[in-house]
Structure formats: C-alpha cells, structure tokens
C-alpha cells in the first residue's frame, strides 16, 4: 500500500518560497485536495499487522501512472522540475513542472510504501 502526502509552498515577494500559507489555504503538508493536514511525521501504519518497506521519497505522478488509475483526478500535465515540484497560479488550478512569473504556489508528492505482514505470510499481494 502506498501512503501519500503533498508538500505545499507559496511564493512570497521578498522572501521566495515558504511553507507559510495564507490563512484560508491548505496547510504546508496535506492530502491532494488540501483538505486534511497530513505531515509525513503524522502518517501511521494502517494497523498492527503492517510494516514500512520504504523510506519517504519524492514521487512523480506521471501520465502513465495516471493511465493505470483511470478513476484518479488529473490536475497537472505530468511534468516536474528537477526537485519534483509542480507549479500553479493558485491552488485548484492546473499544475506543471515549469515555474513562470505568475506561478505563486507549488507542491510535491511524497510517498512511502507499507505491506501487510499477514499478506506476506500468505504469499498474497497486499494491494489486492
């Protein structure tokens, strides 16, 4: 199972990129929609019979990845900068990997994988 959170930042004139958001905006760590505060440090395993099998890593959600998951909402063009960031004019807009003069928010996707120890013992895939 893949656990996912998004790191969010805003561009402030005179300061550059910052974790500080406007009061009505998402937190600096959130779910995809920005509705839930979801820092990496608060992510827990789904249950006692689960274990982590990876560390946190920046994950690029490519068009191929999305094509394999047809029910997932797409709000970006599948491009990222070298550090995994995607940029947009504002939250709720389409994202791309190119920072322009009018992009004031950015995000990057972090993932960590866990597996059920019950599924490991049975030879079953924990994603089924």
Image (cartoon, rainbow, N blue to C red):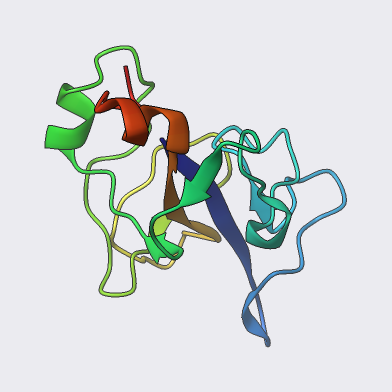
Task: Please provide percent x and percent y for residue 111.
Answer: 43, 52
The answer to which quarter of the image holds residue 121 is: top left
Relative to 128, 42 lies left or right: right
- Decide which of 106, 83 is in the foreground and name it: 83
Name the spot of residue 30 as percent of width and height, x first.
Answer: 65, 46
Based on the displayed image, in which of its 4 quarters is residue 95 positioned? top left
User: Can the viewer see residue 89?
Assistant: no
Q: Name which residue lies at 69% across and 47% down.
A: 38
Residue 14: tell me if it is visible: yes
Lateral position of residue 118 relative to residue 37, left or right: left
Asked whether 123 or 46 is in front, the reply is 123
- Where 49 sits versus 114, above or below? above
- Which residue is farthest right? 23
| Image: 89 above or below 94 | below
Where is residue 125 shown, x and y percent of the image? 27, 26
Identify which residue, 23 or 61, lies in the foreground: 61
| Foreground of the two, 115 or 17 | 115
Tell which residue pokes out farthest to the bottom in this image.
14
Identified at 34% across, 35% down, the residue is: 120
Q: Position of residue 127 (x, y in %)?
A: 33, 25
Q: Quadrant of the C terminus?
A: top left
Q: How many marks?
A: 0
Q: Residue at x 66, y 79 (%)?
A: 13
Q: Is residue 104 above or below residue 36?
A: below
| Residue at the spot 40% in from the left edge and 38% down from the top edge | 94
**Farthest-out residue, left:** 64
> Where is the N terminus found, in terms of image quarters?
top left
Q: Is residue 102 left or right of residue 67?
A: right
Residue 36 left/right relative to 3: right
């Amino acid at each position: 199972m893949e656990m996912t959170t998004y790191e969010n930042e805003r561009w402030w004139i005179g300061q550059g990129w910052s974790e500080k958001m406007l009061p009505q905006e998402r937190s600096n760590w959130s779910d995809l929609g920005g509705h839930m505060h979801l820092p990496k440090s608060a992510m827990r395993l789904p249950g006692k019979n689960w274990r982590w099998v990876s560390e946190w890593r920046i994950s690029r959600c490519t068009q191929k990845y999305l094509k394999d998951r047809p029910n997932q909402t797409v709000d970006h063009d599948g491009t990222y900068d070298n550090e995994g960031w995607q940029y947009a004019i504002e939250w709720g807009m389409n994202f791309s990997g190119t920072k322009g003069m009018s992009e004031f928010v950015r995000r990057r996707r972090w993932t960590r994988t866990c597996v059920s120890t019950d599924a490991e013992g049975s030879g079953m895939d924990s994603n089924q």
